[in-house]
Image (cartoon, rainbow, N blue to C red):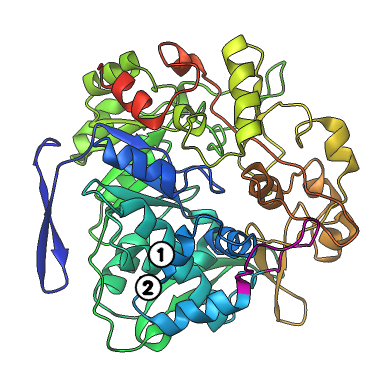
Amino acid sequence: MSTAESISEPLAGGHRHLPGPPALIQGGMGVGVSGWRLARAVARAGQLGVVSGTALDATLARRLQLGDPDGRLRHALAHFPVPEVAERILRRYYVAGGTAPGVPYRPVPRLGLRPNRARDELTVVANFAEVFLAKEGHDGLVGVNYLEKIQLATPAAAYGAMLAGVDYVLVGAGIPAEIPRLLDDLAAGRAAELTVTVAGGDDSAQGHQVRLDPVALLGPELPPPPRPRFLAIVSSHILAAYLARSPATRPDGFVVESPVAGGHSAPPRGRLQLDDAGDPVYGPRDEADTAKLTAIGLPFWLAGGYGTPGGLARARAAGAAGIQVGSAFALCRESGLDGELRERMLRRARAGTLRVRNDPRASPTGFPFKIADVPGTISDPAVYAARPRLCDVGYLRTPFVKPDGAIGYRCPAEPVDTFVRKGRPEEEAAERHCLCNGLLSAIGLGQTRPDGYQEPPLLTLGQDTGFLAGLPDDHSAADVVAHLLGG
């Protein structure tokens, strides 16, 4: 089947007919940068709008505590198919008129292997609400993006998005080999699970599972949701070929990210070397072979440095169905970034003074992470040094086996002495940034601690800002789509 053809997909009780692959995918940018407003604007413009599924439980809970001023979240919750579940969440988190300034946000249940009904309900409802709002009022395509590094949330998150009719699920930051089976099971109304890697006491990896049973959570009356298409986000043709070799792991297509794409990127193959600026050095081995990608026979999109009309033409000439673009949308009016931070970053980018470094140490995941240097944010060494280390959100915590056989959780961004007590060397914690708190702050949802300390923001963007040429000074998502498609 050519990439221009439409695809019929399984649907509970039948099939649905969807249009062929879009030319543009708006990249999923977390936390909350690609929210429902951005995804909806891109979908209305005829391309694939993607909401970030990262930390949606926290963003929903915090926005409800701010009073949900425009009422949109309560509108979405009113459409959740099991009203009593939505009502429980409103009772727990909604504050009419919003909490007083300086009052800390109420925490949400942390991710973990142990079953937690309140956590699953919140995750399901939060993903439903985001996708519901993104899809409302048009017939365009909407996707949701998840990180393989945050496996503990994925079954409940994907189920919530599917209940809202999400068209695509995109997963990166790892090897998403079990996602096709997960989506199949959820679409059939069966209990679904993912294997979670747990570090053993001897540093070996042990397999554990995180599970979601839709019937046990929401009851037997709810019909199974339609199955979305699945796109695996990869950095090489080698991983793409590995996933495509078996029906059990084969996605419906690939997004192939280059090292200059925003957020996390895959580390270079081979021994890590740094350039004079401290960025990892990538070479020919890190470049995806588009001829080999084409030979796989599944549609693919190129990402990272392709966000221009010329980039789209280059991608298509290489056999791609199109491109994924993130940074141009991150800086548009519908972006979820705090408005003042967005404007500051946009001004610096247009002036050519914005430096985006690919920091090999910042992320607790161990993957290089793009950090935009903007004064007053965590990229400022003085701001970073002044921040008391704390891991109170915990999306990037990883499970490990304690000496007594119990499961514990650790994060290199937590207090160093705490991390060392959990069996890891001190040097692993050096220079790590708390992405969870920093990215929440970047969308205006930063935590205020009981002592009055306010979490500073952390900003990320792609390293190639050439996409700004030809866009209006204060551009919209529709401007980006029109510019890239040549009109």
Quadrant of residue 340 within the rendered picture: top right
- Give 243 or 312, whichever is nearer the viewer: 312
| Residues packed near mark 1 inside 10 Å, few (<14), some (14 to 19) or many (20 plus) | many
Report the disc number at residue 141.
none
For the stretch drawn in magenta, the main secondary structure is loop
- Give 318 or 305, whichever is nearer the viewer: 305
Horizontal arrangement in the rendering, residue 455 relative to residue 30 (left or right):
right
Quadrant of residue 213 within the rendered picture: bottom left
The quadrant of the image that shows the N terminus is top left
- The amino acid pointed to by label 1 is Ala
Report which residue position mark 1 lands on.
Answer: 76
Q: Where is residue 458 shown, x and y percent of the image?
A: 69, 39
Quadrant of residue 293 within the rendered picture: top left
Q: Where is residue 117 shown, x and y percent of the image?
A: 53, 83
Horizontal arrangement in the rendering, residue 337 relative to residue 48 (left or right):
right
Is residue 116 shown to the viewer in this render?
Answer: no
Count of numbered tags = 2
Q: Residue at x 28, y 82 (%)?
A: 222
Q: Residue at x 55, y 62 (%)?
A: 60
The quadrant of the image that shows the C terminus is top left
- The amino acid pointed to by label 2 is Phe
Marks 1,2: beta carbons within 8 A: yes
Q: Where is residue 268 shown, x and y percent of the image?
A: 55, 32
Question: Magenta span covers which residues?
Answer: 93-107
Report which residue position mark 2 lands on.
Answer: 80
Q: How far apart are marks 1 and 2 (CA)?
A: 7 Å
SS for dot 2: loop
